[in-house]
Image (cartoon, grey):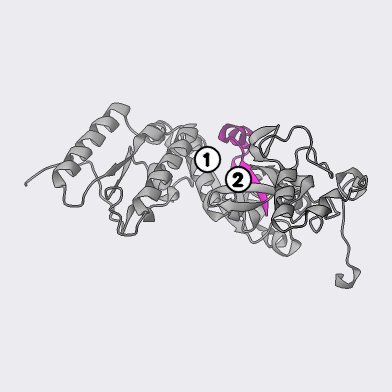
Amino acid sequence: MRLSYPASIRIIKMPCTGRVDTIHILEAFQSGADGVCLVGCLEGDCHFIAGNIRAGKRVRYARVLLDEAGIGGNRLEMYNLSASDGRKFAQFMREMTEKIIGLGPNPIKTVRRLAPDALRGGLH
Amino acid sequence: MIVADRKPFDEIMKMIAPYERILLLGCNECVTVCAVGGTKETALLASQIRMKRQMEGRAADVGERTLERQCDPEYANTLAGALDDYDAVLSLACGCGVQFISESYPGVPVLPAVNTRFMGVTVEAGVWAERCQGCGNCVLDRTCGICPVARCAKSIMNGPCGGSHGGACEVNDDIPCAWQLIIDRLKAKGGLQAYSDIEKARDWSTSRDGGPRKRIREDMAL
């Protein structure tokens, strides 16, 4: 298909979106990610029955936690698609990138640039 | 188990505002089961605090630790020395845990990250409901295993009251009338004649009316 998607996307492979815990999402933002999206199988097509449904619930919960922390829950997204649908994957990645560009960088990074000495022990 | 809710994040941030180095202290017992103060929830809250602090341009010196039980000297004592590195402890345990850590380490501010709600059960995944008020004088043998003290809004011992309608409590339609549940169960087991037994006026001194309670077993003293 020779499709391309934005080079800013970093893919982390997981055995199933159901394996993604809320803390994994928060730590991605804590480490400076501007946006995070979970890409799972279509609902009803999970090899582990309900992994993607559970991931969707965790995404909704993580959005609340990110809003509370001031990062913004709208930087987190979940997409469902078939593993063979490369065209849709590229489209989703472009959509996600445009959305995050519109939101700007992770606010942690902005502050980090302004006052690097004030921070210690924050990332691990 | 003791069931709790996490406090609003803004309230927590306001509480810890004067302190730079904070230890988040989880508890492996009840608050782990009701998903509010175990190792996982401690990590989530720690991550949120780190991010918020970084955005405020402040130091994000947040430690994490979970004790097997915060309400027990055997485990509370394991913190000795470890608290020297912190200005405050933010405990995710119930009110018992917070108080016990505070009693054990009076020199360190111990702050509550959760609001302790009730003694209850897991109805289903993600749903917990109150079942006991620790009244100190159990009547479950006479009420078919349904507690009128904890589950009736008025804690009446000879119910139902006039607020019972369609099996629900007048306080809220989502609350089943405890006395309707008791009568239904008596009927189901063919024991409705027991309903005519009048429960005498109750002595509430075994409950909170008698002040803070204590239990002593001298044979267990070391």
* Label 1, residues with CA under 10 Å away: few <14, some 14-19, many ≥20: many
Span colored in magenta: B1-23
Residue that appears at 56% across and 35% down: B9
Pick the front one: A66 or B18: A66
Task: Report the disc number at residue B49.
Answer: 1
User: How far apart are the two marked residues, 2 and 1, measured between alpha carbons?
Assistant: 10 Å
Pick the front one: A51 or A91: A51
Q: Is residue B197 left or right of residue B165?
A: right
Image location (x, y in percent) of residue B35 = 56, 50
- Is residue B128 within the magenta segment? no
Pick the front one: B146 or A32: B146
Query: Looking at numbered disc 2 in the image, what kind of residue is underneath it?
Result: Ile
- Please give the residue where the numbered disc 2 appears in the rendered image: B22
* Label 2, residues with CA under 10 Å away: few <14, some 14-19, many ≥20: many
Query: Looking at numbered disc 1 in the image, what kind of residue is underneath it?
Result: Ile
Task: Report the disc number at residue B92.
Answer: none
Residue that appears at 36% across and 54% down: A51
Q: Is residue B55 left or right of residue A19?
A: right
Instruction: Say whether residue B192 is visible.
Output: yes
Residue that appears at 42% across and 52% down: A21
Q: Is residue B95 left or right of residue A57?
A: right
In the displayed structure, A36 sits above or below B103; it is above
Q: Helix or strand or loop: what does disc 2 sit on?
A: strand
Q: Mark 2 and 1 residues: CB-CB less than 8 Å, in contact?
A: yes
Q: Helix or strand or loop: what does disc 1 sit on?
A: helix
> For residue A78, which quarter of the picture?
top left
Image location (x, y in percent) of residue B54 = 47, 37
What chain does mark 1 sit on? B
